Amino acid sequence: MGKFTGRRLDLIWFSFCLMHIPTSLLVDLQGLYPPSLLADTPLPAFLEWYIGFSKDPILIGARGVDPAWGWIRSFIALEGAFQVPCFVLGAVGLWRNDKRVYPLLLAYGASTATTLIPVLQALFYYPHKPSLTSPQLINLLFTYIPFLLVPLGIAIDMSLRLIRLVEVAEARKRV
């Protein structure tokens, strides 16, 4: 905590970025990897277990070939190409207390919060999803809602920080 003294939100954002790196690389992005890369690992079995337990239509759709789920596969590609680098750069920037990371984190937060809206909607209604029991739906909501709220919090926080930085710069120009 010493590194983040007086920066409680930065500690939360930093922890979220760090936690999300292995989650993305080891679970979410499995569908993007060549099968040979995962052949001798327990990762596919873990994903199968989780899908069997949760009946998560998002992960089922992401790994299937149903064209109706192409939108989620595009979101997973976005996660690999944009979000994972944001987690790494964001964590490093927050660790160093480098304000130059604010625009990147704002873009990450806004992009991710936006993609979570259709993900959450698909849990409730999507013609190509499996039926979910109430406990499964509640579990999935507890899984996905933080991935809406935390990025939204990051976007709002970074927006406010950038506004303050612009105000300070504008005030200095007037002096």
Image: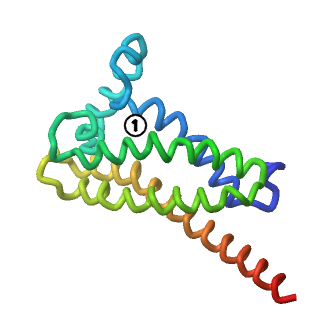
Check disc 1: other Cα within 10 Å, few if <14, some if 14-19, many if 20+.
some
Q: Residue furthest top?
A: 40
Where residue 37 appears, as percent x and y from the top left, is 41, 17
Q: Is residue 61 above or below residue 4?
A: above
Q: Is residue 78 above or below residue 33?
A: below
Where residue 169 appears, as percent x and y from the top left, is 78, 77
Residue 47 quadrant: top left
Kindly identify the residue that appears in the image at 18 percent across and 34 percent down: 65
Describe residue 143's horizontal placement relative to residue 73 as left or right.
Answer: right
Q: Amino acid at mark 1?
A: Asp
Task: Report the label total.
Answer: 1
Where residue 69 appears, as percent x and y from the top left, is 21, 45
Describe residue 65's horizontal placement relative to residue 101 as left or right.
Answer: left
Kindly identify the residue that appears in the image at 46 percent across and 42 percent down: 81
Describe residue 132's horizontal placement relative to residue 39 as left or right.
Answer: left
**Which residue is labeled 1 in the image?**
28
User: Is 154 in front, or is 173?
Assistant: 173
Kindly identify the residue that appears in the image at 45 percent across and 39 percent down: 80
Kindly identify the residue that appears in the image at 11 percent across and 52 percent down: 127
User: Is 115 in front, or is 145?
Assistant: 115
Q: Residue furthest bottom?
A: 174
State the SS at label 1: helix
Residue 161 quadrant: bottom right
Where residue 73 appears, as percent x and y from the top left, is 30, 42
Q: Is residue 50 above or below residue 41?
A: below
Describe residue 87's horizontal placement relative to residue 123 as left or right.
Answer: right
